[in-house]
Amino acid sequence: MVYITRIEHFNAAHKLYNPDWSEEKNDEVYGRCANKNWHGHNFELYVTLKGEPDPSTGFVFDVKKLSIIVKEHVIERLDHKNLNVDVDFMKGKLCSIENLVTAIWNELEPHLPAEVQLHCLKLYETPRIFVEYYGD
Amino acid sequence: MSDKVSVYRKEHFNAAHRLNNPAWDEATNERVFGKCNNPHFHGHNYELIVKLTGIPDPATGYVYDMKKLSELIHENVIEKFDHRNLNEDTEEFKELNPSAENIAIVIYNILRKKIDAALDLHIRLYETERNFVEYPAT
């Protein structure tokens, strides 16, 4: 079994803000991340597939095709966007990277061919902060 | 050979921004700035590298105390821009487009006033890992 990873990136604005809480409570929990006028990041998304290399190609999956699928169903919807305002699949959700990575999984997974297994998504918000999601 | 040495301090901040020229109509802004013109903003992790060049002080061996340089950058630049919307939250970009070029010039001008004129100051600013600018240009 081999794991193959494709890295894609996008830039976006967001804020961490719970509309059920007062402004003070949001400030207390999220600090500067609650800035009502937004802040932003360069996000890096690692998409890892798991599989046996195909004997005729040597590929687990053609990474060029993987890149096209990820770009079409994820990156184009997130890049240079405001995650809270512009992204339909984040509507009504808190825009933490934890919630973003699970939402990306749900958007991406149905578009991968049946013979491919999505193993892991790793999402970097900064070079020092990242989350991993294995679909469970 | 010159006795001058360059020292570098790396800092970072995260911010939202958009590129927009209010003198142009929407179609022109869209054509020139593309996705960067999104009215709802987008954002970046900025990496800032401040370079000082001078002769090391014979008493300390330092061109500049790096701890003090870090504090200077934090107090005057990072506090101002980190987790902010550059267009909405900062005085510097009320009338100035917050392109990487202009951000580098603004940071230079802020720090230049705070650092001994005997030291050369140079700014490198990464907007993404693959896009960066330098000021002054050499």
Image (cartoon, helix red, strand yellow):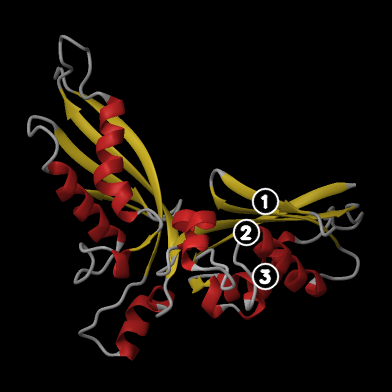
Distance from disc 3 to disc 1, alpha carbons, whole Å, reads 23 Å
Between residue A15 and residue B6, name the one nearer to us.
A15
Residue B15 location in percent, x, y?
40, 59
Determine which of the numbered discs, if any, sits on residue A68 in the image: 3
Q: Quadrant of residue B61?
A: top left
Q: Circle 2: is it few (<14), some (14-19), or many (20+) Cα within 10 Å?
A: some
- Both labels 2 and 1 in a single chain: yes
Q: Is residue A95 left or right of residue A47?
A: left
> Is mark 2 in CB contact (under 8 Å) with mark 3?
no
The mark nearer the N terminus, 2 or 1, is: 2
What separation in Å lies between label 2 and label 1 (alpha carbons)? 7 Å
Dot 3: element: helix
Point out the residue furthest to the left here: B117
- For label 3, the crowd category at 10 Å Cα-Cα, with few meaning under 14, some 14 to 19 and many 20 or more, is few
Where is B57 relative to B125, above or below? above
Say if A42 sits above or below B37 in the image: above
Q: Label 2's element?
A: helix
Amino acid at pointer 3 = Ile
Which residue is under mark 1?
A: A131
At 70% from the left and 67% from the top, the residue drawn is: A104
Q: Residue at x 24, y 37 (%)?
A: B72
Location of residue B124 by image quarter: top left
Residue on which disc 2 sits? A97
Counting from the top left corner in percent of width and height, residue B43 is at: 44, 64
Between label 3 and label 1, give the one nearer the viewer. 1
Q: For this rendering, which residue is in front, B48 or B72?
A: B72
What chain is tagged by disc 3? A
- Tell me whether the residue at label 2 lies in contact with that at label 1, contact meaning CB atoms closer than 8 angstroms: yes
Q: Is residue B90 left or right of residue B13?
A: left
Q: Quadrant of the N terminus of chain B?
A: top left
Image point (50%, 57%), residue name: A42
